[in-house]
Image (cartoon, grey):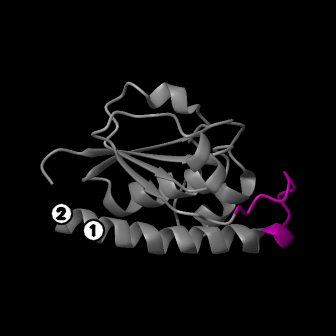
Amino acid sequence: MEDKQKVLFICTGNSCRSQIAEGLLKDMENEDFEVFSAGSHPSRLHPNAIAVMKENNIDISDQTSDSIDQYRDMGINIVITVCDNANQVCPVFPESVKRIHWSIDDPFRGWDSGEVHLNNFRKTRDELRTRIKDFIIEMEQS
């Protein structure tokens, strides 16, 4: 790829799934993609998302929970929704924007950041890692 593709991951709260996806893609393919995440109803970054990414030596603690509206005029090339709700309410981007939808289970079970909830986040992280690896391969082949 000659130019960096701008990829936007979207979920409802922009606290878990899209944040993890942003961190993973940045870590895996930073030279090919400019990566962002946003939410239809942004809240804040979940401490468990930070914790499970730190387990893989990826620091997402500086990422912010942003509104989709911030990215509408940024020349986004690829929008990936990672939850069904976000897929339904995702605003219209120009026709040239590639839309992808992944239905990823929400690890959010409240704001408790206790150890008991980390497995949900680990499963989400691992599923996203697999999908992102496949996405990278697909993009390299196109």
Q: Position of residue 19 (x, y in %)?
A: 57, 50
> Based on the displayed image, in which of its 4 quarters is residue 27 positioned?
bottom left
Q: Quadrant of the N terminus?
A: bottom left
Magenta part of the protein: which range?
Answer: 106-117
Give me the residue at 51% from left, 57% from top. 21
State yes or no: discs 2 and 1 in contact (Cβ < 8 Å).
Answer: yes
Does residue 140 lie above or below 90 as drawn? below
* Residue 114: in magenta span: yes
Viewer-proximal residue, 141 or 4? 141
- 44 displayed left or right of 55: right
Q: In which quarter of the image is the C terminus?
A: bottom left
- C-alpha distance separating marks 2 and 1: 6 Å
> Based on the displayed image, in which of its 4 quarters is residue 125 positioned?
bottom right
Does residue 86 lie above or below 100 as drawn? above
Q: Amino acid type of disc 1?
A: Glu
Determine crowd level at label 2: few under 14, some 14-19, many 20+ residues with C-alpha closer than 10 A.
few
The residue that mark 1 highlights is: 138
Q: Position of residue 68 (x, y in %)?
A: 54, 33
* Residue 138: in magenta span: no
Helix, strand or loop at disc 2?
Answer: loop
Give me the residue at 40% from left, 34% from top. 93
Viewer-proximal residue, 46 or 92? 92
Q: Where is residue 25 in the image (x, y as percent from the top left)?
A: 41, 58
Q: Position of residue 113 (x, y in %)?
A: 82, 58
Residue farthest to the left?
A: 2
Q: Can residue 140 be seen in this view?
A: yes
The residue that mark 2 highlights is: 142
Give me the residue at 17% from left, 44% from top. 3
Q: Amino acid type of disc 2?
A: Ser
Give me the residue at 27% from left, 68% from top. 138
Magenta part, dominant SS: loop
